[in-house]
Amino acid sequence: MPSDAPVVIEARGVDKTFSIPTHRVDSLKERVTRPLARREYRELRALRSISFDVHDGEFFGIVGRNGSGKSTLLKILASIYRADAGRVRMAGRLAPFIELGVGFNPELSSRENVVLNGVLMGLSRQDARRRLDAVLEFAGLTEFADLKLKNYSSGMMVRLAFAVMVEADADIMLIDEVLAVGDAAFAQKCLDVFREKRRAGKTVVLVTHDMATVQSFCDRAMLLHDGELRYIGDPEEAALRYYRLNFGGDGADRGPRPGGVPDVNVKLLDAWLTDDAGERVENVEQDLPIGLNVEVEARHDLESPVFGFHFLNADGVQVFGLNCTLPDERARLAAGQRARIAARIENPLLPGRYYVTCWISRNRSQGDLALHVLRLLEFVVYGTRPGPGSVSVDADVEVVVDAEVER
């Protein structure tokens, strides 16, 4: 997408606030007994001064956690909501795919709804009828063309709505969470459409939680959080910041476990992860070091204890492990005495969920366990570079191709 392409979507200072009732009057009794009761509302600022441009032919992603304002912004772009402040300018014919069933009449058949929606998207009635067969074929609903929509399943509705948007062949497509609904075959069909529209130079604005799609298709992406624009630019960076918001939360308020976790000879007081700055974290960013911290208290004398830690993937398969001893290998950890273990581990783990288990041998020569295998921590490694297996490895790889075989 050329950076000098004309702007087709211009948003400046967009604000949107909703009034949410603090008490819902749901029953007839409440309405009768309190007919003049004053309703109280609280304000929810869904969008706060959002400004951005989308260029002609750009595949533009909007990402953020639930409640960040993504869908609200898309509805303002589609003129479903009116902004409280700011302005939005659009250049070109628009096709929205925003909410299941929006613009459909459940009492009409899919055949009638397709024509109606085509007209609403700017097609003439003749053009809408001409594209009817293509819409129904794309949606796989030809045999249900005369069935009223109220009898459709949610999956059938999604396929129909998406097919109508695709066949409308508008200049700008607004798509909200299309990959979150439907089956695997439908999701693949959506991805094929994205590739086709990208090659055709169509402008697509996509709201999604699927960072792989953002990285694969988007020219730029925007991150929203609590109604504010936090980042706009490189899609890989937007995806990484999204992961940080989801998994990189502050774990500083996680104090020692109340009362500790007792076992036969050892009490586990606390276990936590830290980032490179030494701050407590609940999850770990890909490629950044892992700080593992454990605090235990001996319930009985421990002779020359060895502390072992195993890192397991979500399937319970051990990925790697490490052992450590007291500063003096022959030292004793007396009853009531505490030991604090801090390890800094280079992080080879690929994105995914992992667990840390611990065992402590009371005497290295005899190998008996003071603390039986215990799951200490559960955490997520987040990042934008997935791969096969659980770890990334450095390797020098050379590929040699023989000379072309004569035929």
Image: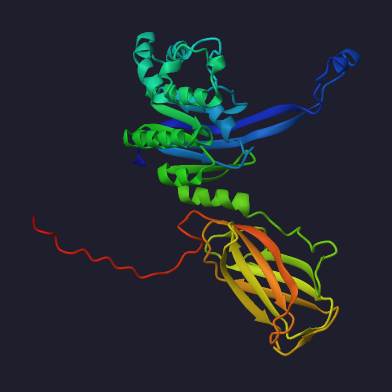
Looking at the image, what colour scheme do you see?
Answer: rainbow
* Residue drawn at x 43%, y 20% as measured from the top left: 141
Residue 312: image x %, image y %? 60, 63
Examine the rendering and report whether any part of residue 76 can be seen.
no
Q: How many marks?
A: 0
Whether residue 45 is situated above or below residue 259 in the rendered picture: above
Residue placed farthest to the right in the image?
33
- Place residue 1 in its image quadrant: top left
**Where 370 falls versus 15 (above or below)?**
below
Q: Is residue 179 left or right of residue 134?
A: right
What residue is shown at x 54% (from left), y 30% (from top)? 74
**Along the viewing direction, whichever of 126 and 154 lies nearer the viewer:** 154
Against 279, is 183 above or below?
above
Q: Position of residue 236 (x, y in %)?
A: 47, 50
Question: Residue at left 14%, top 63%?
Answer: 403
- Residue drawn at x 36%, y 42% is 3
Residue 77 drawn at (x, y percent): 52, 27
For residue 50, what is the image quadrant? top right
Left or right: where 135 falls relative to 251: left
Placement of 287 over or under 122, stated as above or below:
below
Residues 321 and 38: in front is 321
Q: Is residue 74 visible?
A: yes
* Percent of width and height locating residue 38: 85, 20
State which quadrant residue 260 falls in: bottom right
Furthest residue in direction left, as rendered: 407
Quadrant placement of the C terminus:
bottom left
